[in-house]
Amino acid sequence: MRTLTPYPVMRKLGVNFVLRVLRDAVGLTAAFVAALPQPAQAQETAKIVRVGRLSPVSAETDAPQIEAFRRGMRDLGRVEGKTYTIEPLYAQGKPDRLPALAAEFVQRRVDIMLVGSSPGTLAAKNATRTIPVLMVTTGDPVADGLVESLARPGGNVTGLTTLAQGLNAKRVQLLKESVLGMTRMAVLTSPGDSYAAAFEKEREEIARALGLKIQVLEASGPSAFEQAFAAAAVERAQALSVLPGIVFQTHRQSIVELAASRRLPAIYPERAFVDAGGLMYYGASLSDMYRHAAAHVDKILKGAKPADLPVEQPTKFELVVNLKTATQLGLKIPQSVLLRADQLIR
């Protein structure tokens, strides 16, 4: 009886030949599968991105900004400790420490720097031309030499700015409307600061347009605050505008308390001053800016170049009035100002 081979093809071509063909096919399939793009999640977990936070102030003062940035990263699906980490360094209100801290981040080889001031951004830019630097500032990055233009920054710096210099006239106008009959006011500046230089250029124009005599008070540190407020009293200033500045941000509680003791209505460049008891704030929300900064970080981590990412500006500005402070000062703020306020603290 003849035995039949179950696979006629094998009988014709030979069993060994067919086995070799099958083995080669399996190998090609495995190679093809290995070459397929891996899921995005697997790629992102391969490396935890290190964000170096360069802050001009203390950890306590900087906490709201960091938390806002974390919220923005969570909104984008990035989880701290799993896809990224934040490594903070704090200048503790001393701008001269910023260059050394920026250099330390370069030595650590962080993947990106998140910087919270114009002086800090300049220090980071001078420290590296390769690590992306994302700034969140209130200054003019073009005038300060940080970027070539807002539309095309060039180099390794981009981010967000409020162009606070352009808000000076608006703050002075709000003070004049709030303090009826005001003809004399003071502006607190930090000598040598870019904000002080910018205000000096527009000081006469603002004074002429609003019919005011404007006194500039310089204070480079907390030891000079009392002297500055005493000078305002001598000149019979009726109100005060505080310009942005690292030293003022760091010692905001002292400034607010001095304004209260001198019964001097004041407008401030950051919301935190009003939360500390200050009278008025007008500007862009730093928390919103830091939350939005996460989108910039996300784009850079996905391959976008800082040189091609336009520097963004906030589109919404807010007015916050502390009515409790107004009452303590014996100040009745006109309804026309209160109706424009985004929030009234009672």
Image (cartoon, grey):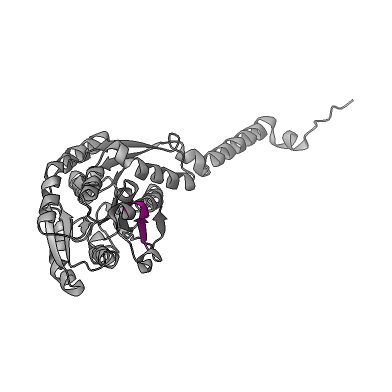
The residue lying furthest to the top in this view is 1
Magenta extent: 314-325
Which of the 4 image quarters holds residue 48? top left
Task: Look at the image and tell me whether residue 160 can be seen.
Answer: no
Q: Is residue 211 left or right of residue 15?
A: left
Task: Look at the image and tell me whether residue 333 can be seen.
Answer: yes
Q: Horizontal and vertical percent for residue 108? A: 26, 34
Closest to the observer, 31 or 317: 317
Q: Horizontal and vertical percent for residue 251? A: 22, 43
Closest to the observer, 263 or 97: 263
Q: For the point 26% across and 67% down, which residue is it?
A: 180
Q: Is residue 177 magenta?
A: no
Q: For the point 48% across and 47% down, which residue is it?
A: 75
Q: Horizontal and vertical percent for residue 2? A: 87, 27
Q: Horizontal and vertical percent for residue 293? A: 37, 51
The residue lying furthest to the right in this view is 1
